[in-house]
Amino acid sequence: MNILQRLISNNYEFTFHEFFEGKYGAKYCSVCCEVICGPAYIAEEDGGNNMHKSCAELPGKIEQHPFHSKHALTIQYSFNQNPIKDMICDGCSHVSSCLKFRCKMCKFNLDFQCISNNHHRGAILKDNDVMTKYHPHKLQLLYFSAFKARDSLFCCCCLKSILDSAYVCFPCKLFVHETCFNTIPKRMESTYHPQHPLLPRSIIITAAKESRYCQACGERVEGIELRCQKCMYSFHVSCGKRTTPGLTLDDQEHKLFYLDYWDHSGDCGVCKNPCEGGAAICRCIQRGESFHINCILPPELSHESHDHPLTLTNSVVPRCNPDEYHCDVCETKGDIKRHVYHCEECYYIAHIECVLAEEDPPLKIVLKNKDDTDKQDVKVQEVEAEEQIDKMQEADYANDDQEINESADESSDDQVSEESDQESNIDDESENNSNEDQRTKKLNKEIKDVKGKIVKLSFKLKRLEEKHKQ
């Protein structure tokens, strides 16, 4: 029984094409992983197993293959609970979504290239498992160049996609580029944390409370970290390796680092508004504080490297293409998504760190704290209370003026009537005086309450000022 017959017997449906050429995108053979162009069997359902005619007619069972002579190998057309592990060819260590010939007893897989003996990496079976002090489990070296979903896998060291060779730990679901694994430093002096050395160590996450987060970028650290044992700081290997110079703060002891993406909780140290939403920030690693770019960096400055003023922006259009986008100060390639200082007239571009060098005067930043904010709130409340008293007094004066004017008009128009009813008017006047006394008492009580609030607020402000001086 060939491969096609085995698939049809398991309710797969195909249409035969004498000559197939994908008009709306190429289709790949599920057996050899090559582009289909010519006679082919095409699956009725999207995402099904499409095959060259020649591949479909290969035998579905192979007896005594040189790479596994103990048992027969049978074509496998579905994946189990661990699809990536089932996609590994044990002959060449390549990972692909192509069909495999499998020995279920030994859990041994071979792809088409190794079955046909025309794959040079399958000529000799090698043990690609390694042990390292950075991780407690064996790591298996695999090749992902033919794996269609490789963009969904990320290296725990550099956080970039797995596109080629990588070491894998399946129990921990850990992926590390081969190049990253071979360049893990034994000890590192980092610009992010110059006080102490960073040492690599393994992370085995068994509960959410044991999660580690990078002190630099704020993202979760998995697999392998760079760790400061004294400060208990964790860094991604890629973050620890960065050599970006920091910007000096006004206290000369701490430095700010530009991060092009930040999507974590926390308020800006200047304006106290949230720093989140994936925006770029400047971050002080030692203080654990973040700052909005526009709150902390000058919007315009002059630099000795250029005759015109430079403006802060993050929307500079590349000269021709991203590959030619570079800093005119250090002459290194730049990132088009990054904030830079630029001259629009001359199309001059400079890194923030290049024009705000460490030898320049430090950034004069007013770092607000909670006491400062409380003092501001107290002063605002005090001003509002005084304004409330003024409004109440103005309203009272306006009522008095209105009553005086109304009394004058009434006495002028009804003088004769008032003389004849003098006794009655005296009673009315007494009643008016009584109402006025009540209003005055009510107003005095409100003024007294507001003044009491002012006294309390003033006392609170005084205590905050004394605490701030300490």
Image (tube, rainbow, N blue to C red):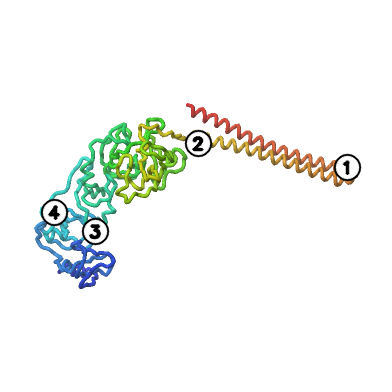
Location of residue 415 by image quarter:
top right
Q: Is residue 38 above or below residue 382?
A: below
Give the class, few, some or many, for how many residues have Cα within 10 Å of label 2's Cα (few <14, many ≥20).
few
Looking at numbered disc 3 in the image, what kind of residue is underneath it?
Answer: Asn
Cα–Cα span, label 3 and label 4: 26 Å
Front in this rendered view, residue 65 or 414: 414
Residue topped by disc 4: 121
> Quick one: 119 or 418, which is closer to the camera?
119
Q: Position of residue 12 (x, y in %)?
A: 24, 69
Q: As shown in the figure, which amino acid type bears the numbered disc 1? A: Gln
Q: Residue at x 16, y 63 (%)?
A: 74
Q: Is residue 137 above or below residue 58?
A: above
Image side of residue 255 versus residue 442, left or right: left
Which of the labelled discs sits on residue 179, or is there none?
Answer: none
For the point 31% across and 31% down, the residue is: 195
- What's the CA distance linking mark 1 and mark 3? 108 Å
The residue tagged 2 is: 373
Kindly state the secondary structure of the residue where label 4 is placed: helix
Helix, strand or loop at label 2? It is: helix
At mark 3, the secondary structure is loop
* Kind of residue indicated by mark 4: Arg
The answer for how far apart the CA atoms under marks 3 and 2 are is: 58 Å
Q: Nearer the viewer, mark 2 or mark 1?
A: 2
Q: Earlier in the sequence, mark 3 or mark 4?
A: 3
